[in-house]
Image (cartoon, rainbow, N blue to C red):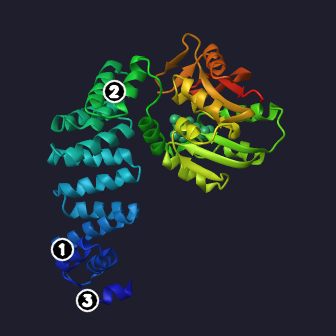
Amino acid sequence: MSHASSSARAPISDLLRLHRDGRLDEAAAGYRRILDSRDPVDPVERQVAMANLAAVEASSGRLDEAVDLYERARSLAPDQAGLAYNLGCVLARRGDHARAAEVLEGFLRASPADFEGLLLAARSLRLSEQPEAAAVRFRQALELRPEYALGHRKLGNVLRDLGRNEQAIEAYRRGAALGDSISPHLAAALSGDATERAPAEYVRTLFDHHADAYDEILRSLGSRGHELLERALSDLRVDWPVQRALDLGCGTGLGAPLLVDRCVELVGVDLSSRMLENASHGGAYDALVEADAVAFLHARPSAHWDLIVAADVVVYFGDLGELFDAAADGLAPGGHFVFTAERCDDAEHMLTRSGRYAHSASYLRRVAHEVGLRVSSLSSATLRLEAEQEVPGHLVVLTRPPA
Ligand SMILES: C[S@@+](CC[C@H](N)C(=O)[O-])C[C@H]1O[C@@H](n2cnc3c(N)ncnc32)[C@H](O)[C@@H]1O
């Protein structure tokens, strides 16, 4: 530090050039020299150095330092709206959504028609539990760019949070009409329209988004899925380990401990690359493949797998014909397909408000029969808690009859 403050100060214009050229360390060292200088420094130069050092810190992921510098720069130039925007961005990245919303509201007073500012404010408002205000900001952003499909989906999400289902469906339908591939599923989940399965893009986006928090979310829901599957696996009359096991929709790999000692080769397949990345950290899988479950099963030879496990994955399929058919084809004679599913009693399958499907026991039995799988066991079980309500489900073992 003393070295930095004893060196000569470069003109701010030179430092900005270094900054623009991506020579961030050199630019940052120059900004610090200005800020640490004991000689008088022009106040504008000082403020520019502070704001730009904040930008370097933010781009290096040092968010606390960036927030502190932006706050100080703002106290030197309270009228500079851009500083409020940048500070709001960093606060949002740091997860400080309530403060981000407050700062961005300040920015919007100066720049009320800033599209990016409106979107970021809307997001921060939603994440800080202010859905009414978030809806207002999303609507204002969409007035500026009505063709922004993702914005309609986001507005729909806020309206859904607010329980305004009709308005949410309307927003999702606009998003869908503008080409958003996720909105149709969300509209269907609220309207109860029958659909065959959750679109791959919906599943991918959902799980990419939640990948890092997934394990924690599952714990907080008191999920019993793996415990149930462990019970089903230990009840199987199988000579462990089997040769090949497939964790279908393996997610972050929470099912791997059930399988790793029960097979010689364990493969995981999932649509979400972020979930797979987390699954790779445990080192339990011999291969992890980013693919759709049905497409993956069909791409492998028939009769390949001794065991297929799907923990909380069947819920992303409404019609189970294709999935069961692919599993039946992929299983070796005598092999088992073990999974959990959500239960409904009034329909064969239905898309629930959560965006997942529930299935009736008779439907599971019928489709299994149609694809030539034997129902070895099918029992009712509570899967987890949702809004403090028990989610009813099935624990199922289907078996390909021995040759
Ligand atoms: C609720 S998570 C369960 C993850 C994991 N099985 C577990 O027990 O923690 C559902 C997973 O299934 C994956 N998934 C859903 N539909 C899929 C499909 N059609 N093909 C492949 N993966 C799918 C999702 O990406 C997600 O990672």
The residue that mark 3 highlights is: 8
The Cα–Cα distance between marks 1 and 2, rounded to whole angstroms, is 46 Å
CA distance for labels 1 and 3: 15 Å
Q: Is mark 1 within 8 Å of ligand 1?
A: no
Whole-percent x and y of residue 267? 64, 47
Q: Are marks 2 and 3 in contact (CB under 8 Å)?
A: no
Q: What residue sits 59% from the left and 12% below the top?
A: 345
Q: Nearer the viewer, mark 2 or mark 3?
A: 2
- Within 8 Å of ligand 1, the CB of disc 2? no
- In this rendering, the answer to whether 174 lies above or below 348 is below
Q: Secondary structure at mark 2?
A: helix
- Vertical comparison of 69 with 176: above or below: below
Tag shown at residue 342: none
What amino acid is labelled 2 in the image? Leu
The answer to whether the beta carbon of the residue marked 3 is less than 8 Å from any atom of ligand 1 is: no
Q: Residues within 10 Å of mark 3 (few under 14, many from 20)?
A: few
Disc 1 target residue? 45
Q: Is residue 75 left or right of residue 259?
A: left
Give 334 or 307, whichever is nearer the viewer. 334
Who's the residue at 60% across and 16% down the image? 363
